[in-house]
Image (tube, grey):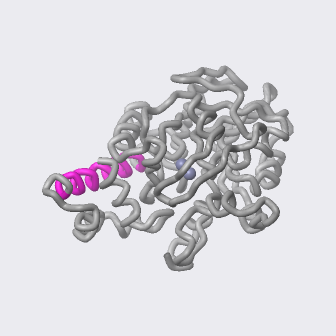
Amino acid sequence: MQEGMNRRSFLQLGVVAGATAMAPRWIRAQAAPAAQPHPSTGDAPIKATKLYDNLYLLQGTGGNMALQTGPEGNILIDSSYAPAVPRIREAIAAVSKDAPFVLINTHWHGDHTGGNEGMHAAGFTICAHQKTRERLSTTQTLKVFQRTFPPSPAGALPTVTFERELRMWHNGDSLDLVHIDPSHTDTDIYINFHKADVLHLGDTFFNGMYPVIDESTGGSIGGMIRASEMSLAMVSDSTKIIPGHGPLGSKSDLQKFHDMLSAIRDKMAALKAAGASEQEALAKNPTAEFDAAWGKGVLSKDVFAGTVYRTL
Ligand SMILES: [Zn+2]
Ligand SMILES: [Zn+2]
């Protein structure tokens, strides 16, 4: 990747430009000894965008976060990674004097859970799908980046978990937290704010870039396509859709994402059915028509296409 080719995406995803830095910064940060923090990962400012009276999109490095404020206590969705905790706390304090309440994790990945321990220490109770707790409790590998992650400390683990869905009535709105069948991982949930008409899809939606599909914890291209179809059926043209990465999206953005995934899945499936090996299939460049628009994010086209091939 070239420095400056898509600076905004790099910053939002926490990706460092350069040949040896294809992995998101949270992976590098977690892999590094605790005594050698990466100051740059925590220094990125967090931008707050108001989506509704008491609901904000928070964007820094790591995955996109959301904050619901109110007298019943603040709900935070996702926690970026550990060095970002002071910045997250500043961003919350800038818009709210309300007490901490619940931190919801969209899935287990460290760019969404790395700040769990710090935000828990700041007063948030952590809520997630049961499998997010299970995966954070044990050693995990992330094949696409060839990394292994040790179990998280106790203070980082969700202590309120569910299997299928959970509804919360809070600060004048009702929120559905619903498990998504395996797609990006097997731990993904969406959070739907009914009154605000805001849907957080976690990493089942990358807006404007090829998505990470974590084949080592249940992700697949078919699951990603089914998740986007399920989401499209839920939303209207006025729904604000928060992707795990990339700018705030709309139904038409999600439709484009779905159509891109489907087209590449179909091309790759035809190559695989004709007997092409993964390398032979990649050599046919099945993502070619999409690379200009979608190929400037966290993954190179070939890393993405490889996960498509392997998870068909
Ligand atoms: Zn992510
Ligand atoms: Zn993820």
Foreground of the two, 4 or 38 = 38
Q: Left or right: 102 with respect to 140?
A: right
Magenta span covers which residues?
253-271
Where residue 219 sits, quadrant-wise, is top left
Coordinates of residue 270 in the picture (x, y in percent): 17, 54
Coordinates of residue 80 in the picture (x, y in percent): 67, 51
| Residue found at x 58% / y 30% | 129
Coordinates of residue 81 in the picture (x, y in percent): 70, 53
Where residue 304 sits, quadrant-wise, is bottom left
Majority secondary structure of magenta residues? helix
| Residue found at x 49% / y 38% | 239
Reply yes or no: does residue 185 show up in magenta: no
| Residue found at x 65% / y 25% | 173
- What count of labels does the image hold? 0
Q: Left or right: 249 with respect to 75?
A: left
Reply yes or no: does residue 269 show up in magenta: yes
Foreground of the two, 205 or 250 = 205
Residue placed furthest toward the left: 274
Relative to 64, is 2 above or below?
A: below
Foreground of the two, 215 or 7 = 215
Can you see residue 185?
yes
Can you see residue 240?
no
| Residue found at x 67% / y 44% | 151
Coordinates of residue 45 in the picture (x, y in percent): 74, 61
Where residue 96 sits, quadrant-wise, is top right
